[in-house]
Image: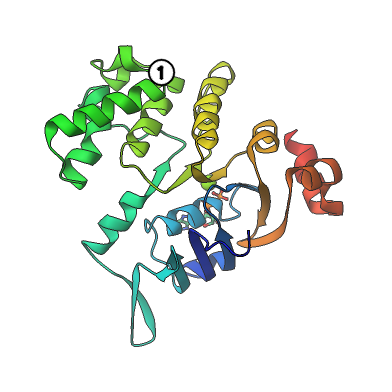
Amino acid sequence: MSDVKPLIQLENITKRFKSLTAVNGVNLAVHPGEKLVIIGPSGSGKSTLLRSINFLEEIDEGTIRFEGNEVGYIRRHGKLHLDKQPVICALRAEIGMVFQHFHLFPHMTVLGNVMEGPLTVQKKSAAESRETALAMLAKVGLTDKKDVYPATLSGGQKQRVAIARAIAMRPKLMLFDEPTSALDPELVGEVFDTIHALADEGMTMIIVTHHMGFARELADRVIFMEKGNFLAEGTPREFFAEGMNNERIQSFLNRIL
Ligand code: ADP
Ligand code: MG
């Protein structure tokens, strides 16, 4: 893969909240089509890292490259500042994110939720936005729910709508932050199947999850994060069969498996 340009590349990313360093000088390159799973204890900085990639957090140090170009920040008096509209908007459209707690618009129908990005962010026509939204709803198997409001849906269905909404923007990279953690166990499978189908289409993704079965099945590469640092990285086999011969990873896996 080394001759292919990374889709996204993080160099020495640091994010602090006052005296707390949530992400501590992280380096990461994700190549087109790659499926990366990040695991690690609560509070280790996984969400902050994903949010930094999507410019929802303003980093303190480091460089973010998208398709080889440095993006998102301007440096002023030695400090980084998030480059404001419209650059950030354009970048965010390239990077979709799905959260643990769906964040659907409650006052809009399912179709309205999925149309919103193409319509208001990408300024597409209503007809084109609707067509895109219907195609995405078909992809996640929720065509028959297009006219209902989110409150009437199960958690699994809500998350599938959230996925449809994200991919309606045709992102090049998808970030999933514990997409099944808020779901009843019997609803986890349908969301995983939806993510799996996207993966099979070649979508590049970074997934934070505690579901090791899913990680094992989907990941090309697994990273273990602890206290803002990448402690280890390897193939699923190296992680789950051997625990990377690392005591802390083994004890983490023993606790959650
Ligand atoms: P994880 O997703 O791995 O559980 P987070 O990225 O949510 O970890 O959090 C990493 C650390 O940063 C934690 O100590 C958390 O309390 C802290 N943190 C996260 N967001 C904020 C915030 N907005 N303000 C202050 N501290 C935060
Ligand atoms: Mg988190």
Q: What amino acid type should be assigned to the residue bearing mark 1?
A: Gly
Q: Quadrant of the N terminus?
A: bottom right
Q: Residues within 10 Å of mark 1 (few under 14, many from 20)?
A: some
Across and down, in percent, residue 58 comes to 38, 65
How many numbered marks are there?
A: 1
What kind of colouring is applied to the model shown? rainbow
Residue beneath the point at 29% across and 60% down: 88
Q: Is residue 174 above or below residue 101?
A: below
Q: Is residue 240 above or below residue 228?
A: above
Residue beneath the point at 55% across and 43% down: 207
Local SS, label 1: loop
Front one among 182 and 159: 159
Q: Quadrant of residue 192?
A: top right
Residue 181 visible, this angle: no
Q: Quadrant of the C terminus?
A: top right
Front one among 76 and 8: 8
Front one among 34 and 117: 34
Residue beneath the point at 50% across and 42% down: 177
Q: Residue furthest bottom?
A: 77
Asked if the beta carbon under badge 1 is closer than 8 A to the nearest atom of ligand 2, the reply is no
Q: Is residue 159 above or below residue 74?
A: above
For label 1, the residue is: 141
Across and down, in percent, residue 221 comes to 67, 49
Across and down, in percent, residue 41 comes to 65, 48
Q: Is residue 223 left or right of residue 66?
A: right
Q: Residue furthest top?
A: 144
Residue beneath the point at 20% across and 46% down: 122
Q: Is residue 192 left or right of residue 75?
A: right
Across and down, in percent, residue 117 comes to 24, 40
